[in-house]
Structure formats: structure tokens, C-alpha cells
């Protein structure tokens, strides 16, 4: 499954690399969880790690334009295993070792990463580099942010990519280095770096649309018209894997309705923002959409049964579902109606000629403030944006792990090209998220904005109930802003 968030059609089994190549410590725990980058972390990491209060030493980068820092020793890298598998990480670590004499990379990669590294971190033994994204059930990354336990990585952007004559900032696509996710404190400083990304939007069966002569809706009014046509043929307009998949959907819809300025206010829970006309349009659309949603969806909207909801699209029992392109890999072996063909579109516009948005989910890599080898950690992160590393991730992962690196989309084809070209058609890329706050007992972004969707579909909660909860929870979250 999510975020939550990269990804594409599941390839055939790739060539295996030696487990010893990067000194890896594998924990092949395949129990539980799902296969998409976002949900893999959501569902498989249950460590709930709480770090000690260690402050960043604010060290300045000393990297020259040479290929290496000249540092030697062991670099500890910890990465959560997602739909991409382990092989590409092992190959990248090996390539880094080969380009940095005297360096050994000790790689820890598994599906339950937070559990694996929890005890060591409680003893102040931190990995030097961690790939673990926001939105995971364990809250590992959020905990480090809230406790101010991240090393600043602003200087990484100006470092030369090892082996290349360009800086990291030159290699990364616009927008990925200027958002509230990688700059969580609002001080203009970077603490997380963007990794694999995926456009998220609505997936559907192009074959069915061709058969019926239906057009993909460009506005929400056209969406409702299509919903009525589909209903007449016993096809639901909409389904979703789990309510958690409404995060990228909600961000895109908020942006379409509010525009960039009010969208940022909403992400910071600004007082009165949920009373605005643009916010009410969002609530109205979601309320109406729940009436067009396949009624069995909430019962299967959980970590064990979510594939049943995705199967609805393959069986022509529902037209659209919000997802990322990992869904094509997850459902690669699933049965489907004759003539099935994946389709992908951004959200319909609020009004004719209005903005259409597609949220871009991306994973994050970061350095704990307590890491012992921060200079080499930064060198490794810079290497992750090299053509060497980017090509390995894109070609040797179980699904194409695409990084926000200049020129990568030109190398894609097939379904990958379909997904990553969404912005070429004019869709706006949205990639911000609700602001990080100090912990608020009983309240999270998910419980406030996403989980109630199930209750709207079943009728156990009304739109007004949901709005009341959002306003109340936003007051508490706003008061807890860092």
C-alpha cells in the first residue's frame, strides 16, 4: 500500500546482490504490512521510539569538490524496507564503498526498522543515516523532529555530488528543497532530504472508459454526472484502500479550492480557516463523494483487507480510487476484467478551467543529531543524488524507485511514463503537509482529518460532526505548534 508515498509497476525479480556487499544486517521479517512505500512504513514499524534530548552540534560541512571527504571508518545506514526491496540499497552502499577508499557501510534494512534500532538508540547508539518517512505508525521521524534531535542538512545542498561537477541542489527537482516537510521548523533550514517520490491521484480502468465511451471528468460537476451514469450500471464512482489514503487526496483538494496562500494557513491550523468558503467547498465535495462510494469499502479499509477495495477497480465495480503508482505493483498478479488498462489522472478541478492538483508523496532521509559520523553521513546523502545511485534505485529495485533528480523522468517508459508525466499535462504538484506540533494527547492529523471518512461513508458521522471535530482539534494543534 501508502505514504504512504514511490513506485510504479512491479517488475520481475531483480538480480540479487550479496548480503555482505554492504555489511548489511538483514531482518527478513515479512509479516504484516503491505507493499507500497507509504503504507509499508505505516503498517510495519511499531517501535514508537522515543529518543533522548540530544541537540545538533551545528557542524559545518568540510567537503571539497573532490569525490570523497577522505574520511574512513564505518558508516551506519538504516533504511526501512518498502516495496522497493533491499537489493538496490545494497548495491548503492557497495557503490559508495567502492568510490570511498577506507569506508565500510553497515546497512540495516527491514520492514520493522523502528523496532530494530529502538534499543540501540535508547542507549545513545544512533545510525548515521536513516531512511524513514513521516506518516509511519511508529512516529519515528516525527519524534526526532519534535525532540529537536535532527542534524541540520542545509549544507548538503551546496555540496558537490561525489563523482560529479554539480551540487546536490543542482540535481534535485524544483520544489523538493523548499517545503515544510524538509524544513519542519519554519526557520529556512533543512533537516530532512527528499528521496523517492510518486505522483498520487486517481487510478481507474482506461479499458472500461473506452468500452463505455466515457470521458475522464475534468471538473467535479462532470464527476457527479459520471457517477450517475455508472450507478445506472451498478458501478460505484469511488472507493479507497483505507482512510489513510485520503491524505494526498485532501491536500490536493484543499490546494485546488484554497490556492497557495490559504492552503498554507490550513496546514498551520489557522483560526477561522475552516469557516472560509473555500474550506466549505472541500467539505461539501468529500461529503458528496462518500455518497458515491462503494458501500463495502469501510469494512475492508484496514491493513488486512485493503486489497479487496483496490480489486473493486480491477473488477469494474468502482471507477476511481486514490493511490500511488505502487498499486500497479501490488495488483500485478490480481485477476482483472478483460481489456483492463491502468489509467491515472489528477483530481478534477473545482470549477471549469480551475487548477487541477496531484499530490507528490516523497520519502525522507535524515541524520540523527546524536550520529557519530555526521560528515561521512552527509557525503553519503550527497552520493544518493548521483547518477550512479539514481540509476541503481530506478533499475534494481523491485519497483522503480524514482528520485527527484534532474533527467530521471526522461529515462522512464510504459506505466512509469504515464504516472510521472502527470505534471507535463498541467497538473499542479502539491507536496506540503500539516505542520508538526508538540504531542497532543488523543489527537493526530490522521484521527482528525482522515479516519472520519469511514464514518461519513457508513453514516455514523455527519459532515457537520466532522467539521466540528476539525475545528476543535485544530485549536489544540495550533496551540501546540513548535
Image (cartoon, rainbow, N blue to C red):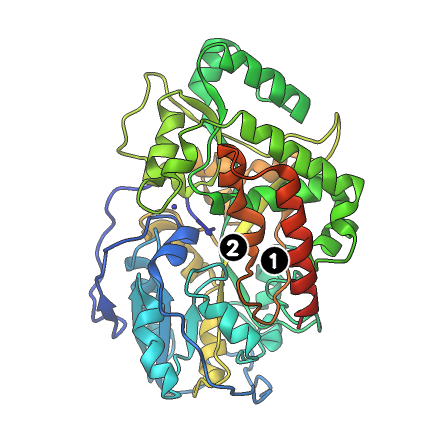
In this view, the residue in front, 266 or 441, is 441
In this view, the residue in front, 451 or 28, is 451
Q: Position of residue 394 (x, y in %)?
A: 40, 51
**Residue drawn at point x = 59 percent, y = 34 percent:** 346
Q: Position of residue 481 (x, y in %)?
A: 67, 69
Give residue 422's quadrant in the image.
top right
Q: Position of residue 149 (x, y in %)?
A: 53, 80
In this view, the residue in front, 242 or 68, is 242
Which disc number belongs to residue 176?
Answer: 1
Instruction: Determine whether 333 is above or below 437 in the image.
Output: above
**Residue drawn at point x = 34 percent, y = 63 percent:** 89
In the rendered picture of this protein, how many numbered marks are placed on residues? 2
Which mark sits nearer the N-terminus, 2 or 1?
1
Q: Residues within 10 Å of mark 1 (few under 14, many from 20)?
A: many
Which disc number belongs to residue 362?
Answer: 2
Real-space Cα separation, disc 2 to disc 1, in angstroms:
9 Å
In this view, the residue in front, 456 or 413, is 456
Q: Is residue 264 left or right of residue 453?
A: right
* Element on which disc 2 rests: strand
Q: Is residue 384 left or right of residue 170?
A: left
Q: Are marks 2 and 1 in contact (CB under 8 Å)?
A: yes
Q: Position of residue 328 (x, y in %)?
A: 38, 37
**Residue drawn at point x = 61 percent, y = 52 percent:** 431
**Residue drawn at point x = 38 percent, y = 82 percent:** 121
Q: Nearer the viewer, mark 2 or mark 1?
A: 2
Amino acid at each position: 500500500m501508502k505514504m504512504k508515498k514511490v513506485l510504479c509497476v512491479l517488475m520481475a525479480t531483480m538480480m540479487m546482490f550479496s548480503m555482505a556487499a554492504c555489511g548489511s544486517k538483514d531482518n527478513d521479517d515479512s509479516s504484516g504490512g503491505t507493499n507500497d512505500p507509504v503504507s509499508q512504513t505505516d503498517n510495519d514499524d511499531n517501535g514508537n521510539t522515543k529518543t533522548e534530548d540530544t541537540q545538533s552540534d551545528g557542524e559545518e560541512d568540510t567537503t571539497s569538490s573532490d569525490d570523497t571527504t577522505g574520511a574512513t571508518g564505518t558508516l551506519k545506514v538504516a533504511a526501512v524496507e518498502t516495496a522497493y526491496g533491499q537489493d538496490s540499497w545494497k548495491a548503492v552502499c557497495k557503490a559508495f564503498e567502492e568510490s570511498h577508499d577506507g569506508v565500510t557501510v553497515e546497512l540495516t534494512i527491514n520492514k520493522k526498522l523502528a523496532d530494530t534500532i529502538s534499543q540501540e538508540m535508547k542507549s545513545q547508539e544512533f545510525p548515521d543515516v536513516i531512511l524513514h518517512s513521516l506518516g509511519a505508525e511508529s512516529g519515528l521521524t516525527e519524534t526526532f523532529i519534535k525532540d529537536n534531535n535532527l542534524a541540520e542538512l542545509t549544507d548538503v545542498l551546496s555540496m558537490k555530488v561525489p563523482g560529479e561537477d554539480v551540487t546536490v541542489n543542482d540535481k534535485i527537482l524544483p520544489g523538493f528543497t523548499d517545503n515544510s516537510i524538509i524544513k519542519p521548523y519554519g526557520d529556512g533550514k533543512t533537516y530532512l532530504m527528499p528521496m523517492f517520490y510518486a505522483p498520487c491521484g486517481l487510478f481507474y480502468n482506461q479499458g472500461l472508459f473506452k468500452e463505455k465511451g466515457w470521458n475522464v471528468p475534468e471538473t467535479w460537476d462532470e464527476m457527479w454526472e459520471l457517477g450517475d451514469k455508472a450507478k445506472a450500471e451498478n458501478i460505484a464512482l469511488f472507493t479507497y484502500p483505507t482512510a489513510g489514503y485520503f491524505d494526498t487526496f485532501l491536500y490536493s483538494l484543499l490546494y485546488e479550492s484554497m490556492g497557495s496562500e490559504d492552503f498554507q494557513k490550513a496546514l498551520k491550523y489557522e483560526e477561522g480557516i475552516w469557516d472560509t468558503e473555500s474550506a466549505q467547498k472541500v467539505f461539501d465535495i468529500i461529503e458528496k463523494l462518500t455518497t458515491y462510494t462503494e458501500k463495502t469499502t469501510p469494512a475492508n479499509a484496514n491493513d488486512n483487507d485493503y486489497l479487496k477495495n483496490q480489486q473493486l477497480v480491477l473488477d469494474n465495480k468502482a471507477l476511481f480510487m486514490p493511490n500511488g503508482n505502487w498499486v500497479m505493483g501490488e495488483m500485478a498478479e490480481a485477476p482483472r476484467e478483460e481489456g483492463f488498462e491502468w489509467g491515472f489522472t489528477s483530481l478534477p478541478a473545482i470549477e471549469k478551467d480551475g487548477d487541477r492538483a496531484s499530490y507528490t508523496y516523497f520519502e525522507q532521509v535524515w541524520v540523527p543529531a546524536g550520529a557519530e559520523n555526521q560528515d561521512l553521513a552527509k557525503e553519503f546523502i550527497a552520493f544518493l543524488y548521483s547518477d550512479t545511485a539514481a540509476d541503481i534505485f530506478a533499475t534494481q529495485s523491485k519497483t522503480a524507485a524514482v528520485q527527484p533528480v534532474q533527467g530521471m523522468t526522461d529515462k522512464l517508459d510504459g506505466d512509469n511514463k504515464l504516472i510521472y508525466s502527470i505534471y507535463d499535462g498541467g497538473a499542479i504538484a502539491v507536496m506540503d503537509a500539516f505542520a508538526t506540533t508538540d504531542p497532543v494527547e488523543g489527537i493526530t492529523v490522521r484521527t482528525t482529518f482522515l479516519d472520519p471518512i469511514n464514518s461519513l461513508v457508513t453514516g455514523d458521522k455527519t459532515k457537520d460532526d466532522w467539521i466540528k471535530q476539525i475545528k476543535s482539534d485544530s485549536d489544540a494543534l495550533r496551540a501546540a505548534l513548535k
